[in-house]
Image (spheres, rainbow, N blue to C red):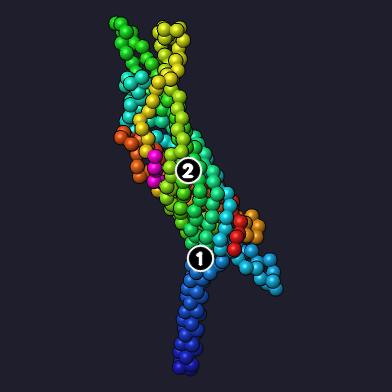
């Protein structure tokens, strides 16, 4: 009787071990499939198969439009000059701008893509600085200098991205190489002291002879991004993303002027082949 009981316990133990082993193997298989699934799915990883009887060919090459809104934070230590006179140093400025262009994206695998875009960028910035001059015992004349600057670039933006497993979220990095195609600026001087207007009795004067430092014609700007690919129907998707970029070179040629730019980007692409 004891031997029969022992045999039953042994058999139960073996079955339990077998079930545990099978569960581990199943879990391992699911985990491997989870990791490999984005790589074996074609295109964007979207389910674009309308029918199993008539399977559709997924495109790998996509073309479309690119647009972005930007916010730039400028820092530096360069002088604003008016009629060959150094008026004040500019140390910080901000501005909202935009980018627009044509884009293409190629999916090397189901979760790795490379893209390029021809982009026009308009990047305005407003700098201001305040000087404080003594005009008598305990009296000061505060004057604010302000420069409204718009820099326009045209160039090529190259990037790559990786789609996170089992999602349509992607992370990526890129590089923009662009050339300065236009520059415009306006400058004013504003009296902040009500008791001290300018000679024409106004409190704001346009500085027609104002100028900023000479600028670099070429910029090289690496960037990082995180985004999401949104299915718009067979062979078409939108790719909004948040982007941060910082140039390798100074904005100005011989003076310290740096710019960090945050972009909200949108690319809409449709399959080519």
Numbered tag placed on residue 255 in the rendering: none
The picture places residue 270, in percent across and down from the top left corner, at: 61, 56
Magenta-colored span: 217-221
For numbered disc 2, what is the local secondary structure? strand
The answer to whether residue 95 is seen in the rendering is: no
In percent of the image, x 34 and y 39: which residue is there?
250
Q: Which residue occupies the foreground of this view, 191 or 1?
A: 191
In percent of the image, x 60 and y 59: which residue is there?
271
Q: Quarter holding the C terminus?
A: bottom right
* Relative vertical location of residue 104 with respect to residue 256 in this rendering, above or below: below
Residue picked out by circle 2: 154
* Relative vertical location of residue 207 with respect to residue 42 in this rendering, above or below: above
Distance from Cα at disc 2 to Cα at disc 1 = 30 Å
* Relative vertical location of residue 65 with respect to residue 48 in this rendering, above or below: above
The picture places residue 222, in percent across and down from the top left corner, at: 40, 48
Discs 2/1, front: 2
Q: Residues within 10 Å of mark 2 (few under 14, many from 20)?
A: many
Q: Residues within 10 Å of mark 1 (few under 14, many from 20)?
A: some
Quarter location, residue 198: top left
Q: Which circle's residue, 2 or 1, is located before the other in the chain? A: 1
Residue picked out by circle 1: 109
């Amino acid at each position: 009787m004891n031997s029969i009981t022992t045999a039953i316990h042994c058999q139960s133990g073996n079955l339990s071990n077998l079930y545990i082993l099978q569960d581990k193997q199943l879990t391992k298989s699911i985990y491997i499939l989870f990791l490999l699934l984005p790589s074996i799915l074609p295109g964007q990883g979207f389910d674009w198969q309308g029918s199993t009887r008539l399977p559709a060919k997924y495109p790998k090459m996509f073309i479309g439009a690119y647009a972005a809104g930007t916010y730039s934070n400028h820092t530096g230590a360069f002088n604003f000059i008016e009629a060959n006179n150094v008026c004040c140093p500019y140390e910080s400025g901000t501005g909202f701008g935009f980018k627009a262009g044509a884009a293409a994206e190629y999916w090397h695998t189901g979760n790795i893509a490379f893209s390029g875009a021809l982009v026009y960028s308009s990047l305005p910035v407003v700098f201001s600085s305040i000087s404080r001059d003594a005009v008598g015992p305990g009296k000061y004349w505060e004057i604010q200098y302000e420069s409204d600057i718009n820099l326009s670039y045209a160039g090529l933006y190259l990037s790559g991205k990786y789609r996170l497993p089992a999602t349509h979220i992607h992370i990526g990095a890129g590089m923009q190489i662009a050339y300065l195609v236009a520059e415009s600026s306006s400058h004013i001087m504003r009296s902040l002291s009500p008791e001290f207007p300018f000679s024409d009795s106004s409190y704001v004067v346009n500085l027609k002879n104002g100028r900023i430092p000479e600028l670099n014609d070429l910029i090289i700007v690496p960037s990082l991004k995180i985004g999401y690919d949104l299915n718009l129907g067979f062979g078409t998707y939108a790719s909004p993303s948040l982007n941060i970029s910082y140039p390798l070179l100074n904005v100005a040629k011989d003076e310290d002027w740096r710019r960090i730019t945050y972009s909200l980007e949108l690319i809409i692409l449709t399959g080519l082949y």
